Image (cartoon, rainbow, N blue to C red):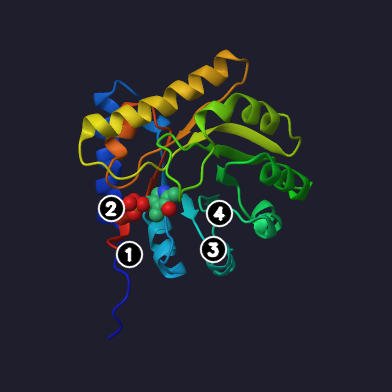
Amino acid sequence: MLIGPQNLTLPVNHVRSRIGSAANAAGRDPATVTLVAVTKTKTAETIRLAATAGVTDFGENYLQEALSKMDNLADLALRWHFIGAIQSNKTRAIAERFDWVHSVDRLSIAKRLSEQRPFHSPPLQVCIQVAVVPEPTKAGALPGALPELAAAVAGLPRLQLRGLMCLPPPQPEAAAQRAVFAQLRGALQDLNARGLKLDTLSMGMSADFESAIAEGATLVRIGTALFGAR
Ligand SMILES: *Cc1c(COP(=O)(O)O)cnc(C)c1O
């Protein structure tokens, strides 16, 4: 007998109920939080099972891996989110195949994505990745660079700048998690006070999504809690 991925209804419903509880505790409508299932290293078959369990949004980090799964799943109406590091020689395929990009952190990449977004597609939905906690090895714009970068990205014709994303280092304490997410929320509010109209905070993963929802996350990117360890 084949050992394959099992029915994913239980873990999907469990994560959804945790999202709902966190939203309710924060006085938020659970419908304002979108679950993005992170499927790096997972098979197309696993994605198909998650879609059967009602997941519509999927996040991928590696372009080649994502493209082959997208081809395999072309019969399903899924929204694809690129959440990994972006090399400039990968922007064309990202602009052609994805609906969202969460990991824009410099203007040169944003310009390429805008130029390469096909005219028959709606504008590419983008978030700027912010290094709220600066780490030398991680991507992300520095908070001080945000006003200028966000204004420039918002002006690109084939992109729609929707908000900010962060990928902070793991912290066990909920209070410390929340302090970081509150900084991203503050950065979004600051940009809106400068005249931008941003509505998206992509923050929170398996270990900290409840803290992120408490601080206003609208997209949570969850892998391990749905699919087990990678
Ligand atoms: C892998 C990954 C996630 C999901 O992490 P889990 O801890 O497995 O939920 C979320 N966001 C990004 C950018 C990732 O690379």
From the viewer's perspective, is 199 left or right of 53?
right
| Residue at disc 3, CB closer than 8 Å to ligand 1 | no
Q: Earlier in the sequence, mark 3 or mark 1?
A: 3
Residue 51 at what x, y percent from top left?
Answer: 43, 56
At label 4, the amino acid type is Ala
At label 3, the amino acid type is Ala
Q: Secondary structure at mark 3?
A: helix
| Residue at disc 1, CB closer than 8 Å to ligand 1 | yes
| Residue at disc 2, CB closer than 8 Å to ligand 1 | yes
Question: Dot 1, crowdedness within 10 Å: few (<14), some or many (≥20)?
Answer: few
Q: Earlier in the sequence, mark 3 or mark 2?
A: 3
Q: Nearer the viewer, residue 61 or 80?
A: 61
From the viewer's perspective, is 177 left or right of 77?
left
Q: Residue at the spot x=42%, y=66% of the render?
A: 41
The mark lying in front, picked from 1 and 4, is 1
Q: Residue at the spot x=62%, y=29% of the render?
A: 150
The mark lying in front, picked from 1 and 2, is 1
Q: Nearer the viewer, residue 185 or 176?
A: 176
At label 1, the amino acid type is Arg
- Residue at the spot of label 4: 77
- Residue at the spot of label 1: 230
